[in-house]
Image: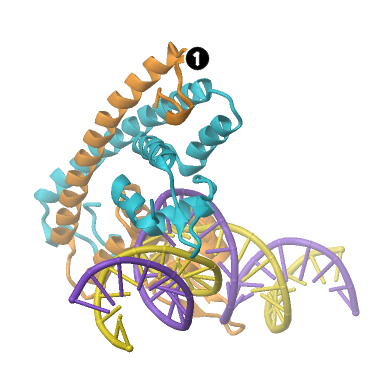
Chain colours: A orange, B cyan, C yellow, D purple
DNA sequence: CTTGACCTTCTACTGCACTGGAAGGTCCAT
DNA sequence: ATGGACCTTCCAGTGCAGTAGAAGGTCAAG
């Protein structure tokens, strides 16, 4: 499979695939006589894993950790669970932060909705923010 | 007021103040004979506004829009209200996205908590993700 | 008169995950 | 044999909001 076909099959781009290879996420594939990359089916499964990792919000560095464990011959289940724990904690924090911010912004917006521009002092730029 | 004092007074750094000036958020201040920046009190109010804008999650570009309107001599209340509307909509979307993601990640984590590494197939890298 | 804290400009780098483009090689159909 | 779609490498840029560091100037205290 050439790089364009793999990109098509996995919904990504040739640029990204070469970038993943440079980043150590995809092993360098075989090459055809003329130097074209020649991927096997495993590459699709691997890219699927990378996609799943990205979809849960793992960084490429974290995805690579998992891949490295698998490539070392060990099942990475335990490490994956740890990463998911960390991710979940971060998500909860992020959601809480955004909800607090939302409350503040909603209040500001409601105040601004009744704004009387003449009350605004130049010095404050805008008193509704 | 020298740049270091202004940084101190507004809880930022001299680096950031020069960056804001370059970005058109802070007007170039007076200079002392020796070339030092010499700020007046208005700079504190302006930086306070920038801080409030940033705290609500506005980009520096959006903050600059507001400042430009004010500097043009108009009260920016209306534009601020629009920016807050946009920001609120974006926050709601962001929160909804994160909550959906949280649900997925929580499921994955729960599955992974009972992981049986021997069930993991090398091909999939890790079936718990 | 020197030390140290402050200031100046300038260029370049950070993190993250790509993305763009140039210059050139390959393959296949017409 | 030529056009177009594909591939190669390499270098550089994107967005965002700063941050780092070098080389040098200024100022007050001791």
Residue closer to the observer: B58 or D2? B58
Q: Is residue B96 rendered to the left or right of residue B43?
A: left
Q: Residue at x 40, y 59 (%)?
A: B15
Q: Position of residue D24 (x, y in %)?
A: 48, 80
Q: Residues within 10 Å of mark 1 (few under 14, many from 20)?
A: few
Q: Is residue A52 visible?
A: no
Q: Would you say residue A20 is visible in this rendering?
A: yes
Given residues B67 and C15, the one toward you in this image is B67
Q: Is residue B85 above or below residue B3?
A: above
Parent chain of label 1: A
Direction from residue D14 to residue B83 in the image, left or right = left
Residue A74 x, y percent position in the rendering: 17, 70
Instruction: Tell me what residue is drawn at x 22 percent, y 76 percent.
Output: A72
Horizontal and vertical percent position of residue B61? 51, 42
Q: Residue at x 23, y 42 (%)?
A: A91
Q: Count the marks: how many? A: 1
Coordinates of residue C11 in the picture (x, y in percent): 54, 74
Note whether A82 is above or below B50 in the view shown. below
User: Circle 1 sits in a helix, a strand or a loop, which is it?
Assistant: helix
Q: Which residue is mark 1?
A: A118
Nearer-the-camera pick, B75 or A113: B75
Asked which quadrant contains residue A81, the reply is bottom left
The image quadrant where one finds the C terminus of chain A is top left
Q: Quadrant of residue D30?
A: bottom left
The residue sitting at 24% across, 36% down in the picture is A97
User: Residue B113, relative to residue A33: is it above or below?
Assistant: above
């Amino acid at each position: 499979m050439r790089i364009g076909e793999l990109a098509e099959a996995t919904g990504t781009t040739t640029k990204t695939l070469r970038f993943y290879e440079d980043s150590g996420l995809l092993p360098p594939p075989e090459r055809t006589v003329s130097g074209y990359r020649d991927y096997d089916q495993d590459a699709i499964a691997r890219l699927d894993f990378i996609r799943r990792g990205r979809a849960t919000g793992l960084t490429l560095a974290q995805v690579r950790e998992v891949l490295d464990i698998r490539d070392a011959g060990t099942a990475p289940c335990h490490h994956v669970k740890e990463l998911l724990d960390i991710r979940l904690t971060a998500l909860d924090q992020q959601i809480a932060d955004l909800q607090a911010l939302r409350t503040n912004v909603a209040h500001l917006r409601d105040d601004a909705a009744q704004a009387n521009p003449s009350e605004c002092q130049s010095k404050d730029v805008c008193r509704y923010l």
